[in-house]
Image (cartoon, rainbow, N blue to C red):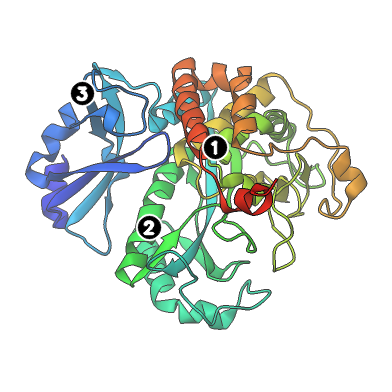
Amino acid sequence: MLAQQAKELGIKYFLVSFSDLFGTQRAKLVPAAAIDEVCETGAGFAGFATWLDMSPADADLFAIPAPESLVQLPWKPEIGWLAADLYSGGEPLPQAPRNVLKQSLAKLQRQGFELRTGVECEFFVLSIDGRTIADPRDSQTKPCYDQQALVRRYDLIAEICDCLIGLGWKPYQCDHEDAVGQFEINWMYANALETADRQAFFKYLVKSLAEKHGMRATFMPKPFDHLTGNGCHVHLSLWDREQGTNLFESSTDDVGLSPLGYSFLGGVLHSAEALCALTNPTVNSYRRINAPVTSSGATWSPNVISYAGNNRTHMIRIPAPGRFELRLPDGAANPYLLTAGILEAGLDGISQRRDPGKRCDSNIYRDIAAADSLRTLPDNLLDALRTFAASDVMRNGLGAAFCDSFLKLKRAQWRDYASHVCPWELEHTLDC
């Protein structure tokens, strides 16, 4: 009973939270005395007021908290955060992101598998108005791992890491990333749903603590055209639920990946263009994956659909036996849809025994001949949405209701973007 747990922990209120289709986190603040009833009946929302493709005529939306997801806010311990599943008319809302992921994980569970994931969430620390890097002395051409800049942000980064330690997430390193003002904090991998919940909460935590310190944190894919963008690399492995063994690991393969792992990887390669709609879901996302060389000398993001061993110039790398890293996603990705899309692509790879082809271990940023022989990633969000709409793998795996709602809202977002005249157009075509 969460009410009893609240008494023991000193929690006065609960944030009953969910992510909509655009990844915006929505919540209601529920008094601890009412939380057990909300766990049974749900916290009520008007679905049309969020990005869930609902109308004002639709019945109430109810968010049922998942008690196992409870996080006591380290910086405000009288509040507990709870991820929630969405219901309408007594049934799970099919387009709700957490429901979509749970549906995919249920299929995986029936096959006796467990997906374990880890994420690398990069973020910028900006001035409170969001216009400039918060630290004006953070200005090196190659600022990655800059010790001085890292320690100047010690108070914020250490507080974030201390929170993760207290929550039992087992963070293991914090660093200044490749762009000025950019940071990353890594924590231990876990089962896919737990990681998705943690990723959603992590973004809330980082933004909240940045505000507390008089700054603003952003996970926006490419906030500055000359700097490396915010990636959200995902590490994946598939495990036997009963035996607890890593099914991606091989002692005979030269990079340590099993035939099952290669089939899963092959599925991700096969559906990569369609997957971009979920891994790179904003207009701004395509400024990161199709970017020219940045001031540091490399974008660190993929340009083509390829895989390699321990080589960061490719979309997928195999850094160690038993797992691979997908370097395609960015900071705008919805944690639940990101994982569900990758999983459905991988399951298709397993069922169809997709062959990923020969590994490409060259520097794909410079190997023009190799790059020209490979499929390219979408140039923009509209192209990604078109390939997503045409993908049977995504539609059959994630469900027609979700795909239709997602495409409807994202196409409307693209049209809204396309209706705006930008300064570049005025500069180059005003006198045409």
Q: Nearer the viewer, mark 2 or mark 3?
A: 3
**Residue at screen point 26% across, 40% down:** 67
Label 1 CA crowd tier, 10 Å (few <14, some 14–19, many 20+): few
Residue at coordinates 69% horizontally, 36% vertically from top-left?
A: 378
Above or below, 179 against 35 in this view is: below
Residue 275 x %, y %:
61, 32
Helix or strand or loop: what does disc 3 sit on?
Answer: loop
Figure check: 150 above or below 355: below
Residue type at the position of mark 2: Gly
- Location of residue 58 (image quadrant): top left
What is the distance, in whole Å, between disc 2 and disc 3 at their CAs? 36 Å
In what element is the residue under mark 1?
Answer: helix
Residue 60 marker: 3
Q: Which residue is mark 1?
A: 418
Q: Secondary structure at mark 2?
A: loop
**Nearer the observer, 273 or 170:** 273
Question: Foreground residue, 350 or 290?
Answer: 290
Residue drawn at x 35%, y 64% is 163
The front one of 249 and 413 is 413
- Which image quarter: residue 295? bottom right
Q: Tell me which residue sits at (57%, 55%) in the image.
A: 222
The type of residue carrying mark 3 is Asp
Query: What number is the disc on residue 168?
Result: 2
